Structure formats: C-alpha cells, structure tokens
Image (cartoon, rainbow, N blue to C red):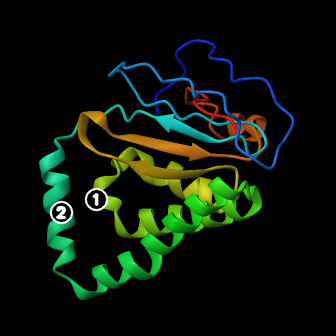
Amino acid sequence: MNKKEGNNKGSGSRPNSSRPSSNKPSRAGSERSGAKPAMAKRAQGPKKVKPSTKADTAPMVNIFMENLKEEGFRKMLKTQFVKYTDACVENFLGGDMKSLFANTKQLSKVVLNNFKPMIPEQFHGVWQRGIDTNDYYLKLCGSGGGGYILGFTKDLEKAKRSLKDYKLEVVYQF
C-alpha cells in the first residue's frame, strides 16, 4: 500500500445480492510505484493490492519448500490453510457472504501467522490491524513482481477510514 496518490474513488454501492455480480472486475494498474489495497462496500468483493516492493519469486518458493519439510507446517496446510481456502471458495460460489467473511478472517490469520516471511514487512501491522478491528481482511496472492494482496471488507467507508494513508482500489464487487 502506498501513501495517497490522488483521489481514487471506490465504486458506488449496489444492492446486496445473495449471488456474485456478473460484472467483470476492474483491474488495478500495473504501476510498480506502490501497493493498492482496494475495498468494496458491504461485502462487495475482493480487492487487489500491489505491494510496492518487488521480490524475486524463487526465494519465496524456497521458503515454502523448506517449510514443507516440517510436519507441523504440512499439518497446518491441510487442517487450516486448505480448509479455509476451500470454505471461502464454496462460500463465494454459494453467495454466503456472512460465512465468506468469517472464513476469510480465519484464512487471513493463518496466512499472517504461517507465511509471514512471504508478506512484505511493511504490511505486517496493517494486516494484523484488519484482523483485530474487523474493518478488512487481507489475503496474499502470488509473490514477486506479480504478487498481490487482496483485501475484503463489508464496509468501504470504514475501511477507507482505517486505511486513510493508503490508496484503495475496488477490483470486484459482489
């Protein structure tokens, strides 16, 4: 996430539906200048954040492969990471927004606690604050120059206040 770079307006609110919208998500720019957390109003979808630091993917893969040698890490993948990831997908496809946010929060905790070396350090506090306040939840997607952080929120205005020092961009709405 980067400091404000102008006035980037989020999308207008839509009636909350039990199924995801068929509208195509907007795409975040390809700037390498900074990350962009994006939040949507009222359970309206994932948002893409482009970390401002460029990292090589190979070291992240090496960290992951080394962690796989540990029984505890493998167990966490099966019992927590896969469990919450699968639940989020099912909740999204089924239009169950309440469960989607509950499972996204749990997934966000699992990722922060177990994949911290893969998350840029400047995001650790922001990540934890979202979990603690329930204003937003973050999810790591990919790594290196192509990595993103998705943010999920039920309330865009509340997330904007919580992340007032960062540029937000909505990339999809439910």
- Residue at left 55%, top 30%? 166
- Between 143 and 173, the one lying in front of the other is 173
Amino acid under disc 2 = Ile
* Residue 52 placement, left or right of 49: left
Q: Which residue is mark 2?
A: 63
- Residue at left 63%, top 13%? 7
Q: Residue furthest bottom?
A: 71
- Residue at left 20%, top 83%? 70
Residue 17 percent coordinates (x, y): 82, 44
**Cβ–Cβ under 8 Å for marks 1 and 2:** yes
Residue 80 percent coordinates (x, y): 46, 77
Q: Which mark is residue 6?
A: none
- Element class at badge 1: helix
- Element class at badge 2: helix
Question: Circle 2: is it few (<14), some (14-19), or many (20+) Cα within 10 Å?
Answer: few
* Residue 168 placement, left or right of 18: left
Query: Would you place residue 118 above or below residue 35 in this image?
Result: below
